[in-house]
């Protein structure tokens, strides 16, 4: 039986599949959860899984509906579901300034019949007052 080097190729393939690369720090929680991502937190950018929600409060005044967005369990310390591990930095999606603890982003809410609720982020109280 002639030797073609197949033995070394086979050994290489076996050892390369046995060595697992560690997940990236930002993706570590995603790897452990093992679920698909459903949405993204508008304040910290963390990919959220099924069941993880962004904490917000909706105010209705006539037909105009406004919402205060506080953050997800990964970035908002007082989240009703509790916060997870180290808190991520929160930034205003409009102007990019860091949000202080307890601060929020302001959004306008649109309800479309037969479709999902649409939210348009307007900014934080700081950049909203500049306009």
Image (cartoon, helix red, strand yellow):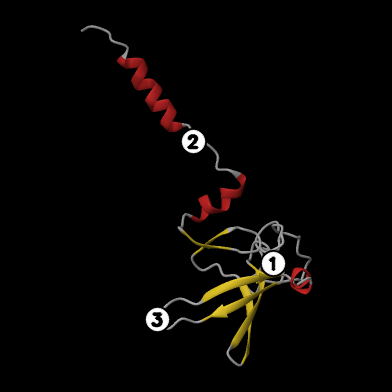
Q: Of circles 2 and 1, which is in front?
A: 1
Label 3 to label 1, Cα distance in Å? 31 Å
Where is mark 3, residue-wise? 114
Q: Position of residue 93 (x, y in %)?
A: 66, 63
Residue 56, quarter of the rendered image: bottom right
The disc, 3 or 1, on the residue closer to the chain's N-terminal end is 1
Q: Nearer the viewer, residue 28 or 105?
A: 105
Question: Which type of secondary structure does the marked residue at label 3 adopt?
Answer: loop
Q: Nearer the viewer, residue 104 or 62?
A: 62
Q: Position of residue 8 (x, y in %)?
A: 36, 16
**In the displayed structure, does residue 82 sit left or right of residue 117?**
right
Label 2 to label 1, Cα distance in Å? 33 Å
Circle 2 crowding by C-alpha within 10 Å: few under 14, some 14–19, many from 20: few
Label 2 to label 3, Cα distance in Å? 45 Å
Image point (75%, 64%), residue name: 99
Q: Position of residue 84 (x, y in %)?
A: 65, 61
Do we see residue 81 in this rendering? no
Image point (44%, 32%), residue name: 18
CB of mark 2 within 8 Å of CB of mark 3? no
Image point (70%, 64%), residue name: 92
As drawn, the label of residue 76 is 1
Where is mark 2, residue-wise? 20
Q: Position of residue 6 (x, y in %)?
A: 30, 16
As drawn, the label of residue 121 is none
All told, the count of numbered labels is 3
**In the displayed structure, does residue 32 sit left or right of residue 105?**
left
Q: Quadrant of the N terminus?
A: top left
């Amino acid at each position: 039986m002639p030797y073609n080097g197949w033995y070394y190729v086979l050994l290489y393939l076996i050892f390369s599949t046995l060595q697992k690369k560690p997940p990236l720090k930002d993706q570590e929680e995603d790897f452990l959860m093992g679920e698909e991502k459903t949405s993204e937190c508008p304040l910290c950018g963390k990919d959220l899984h099924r069941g993880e929600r962004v904490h917000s409060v909706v105010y209705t005044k006539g037909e105009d509906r406004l919402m205060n967005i506080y953050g997800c369990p990964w970035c908002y310390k007082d989240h009703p579901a509790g916060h997870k591990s180290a808190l991520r930095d929160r930034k205003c999606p409009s102007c990019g300034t860091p949000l202080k603890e307890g601060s929020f982003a302001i959004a306008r809410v649109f309800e479309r019949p037969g479709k999902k609720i649409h939210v348009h982020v307007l900014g934080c109280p700081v950049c909203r007052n500049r306009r």
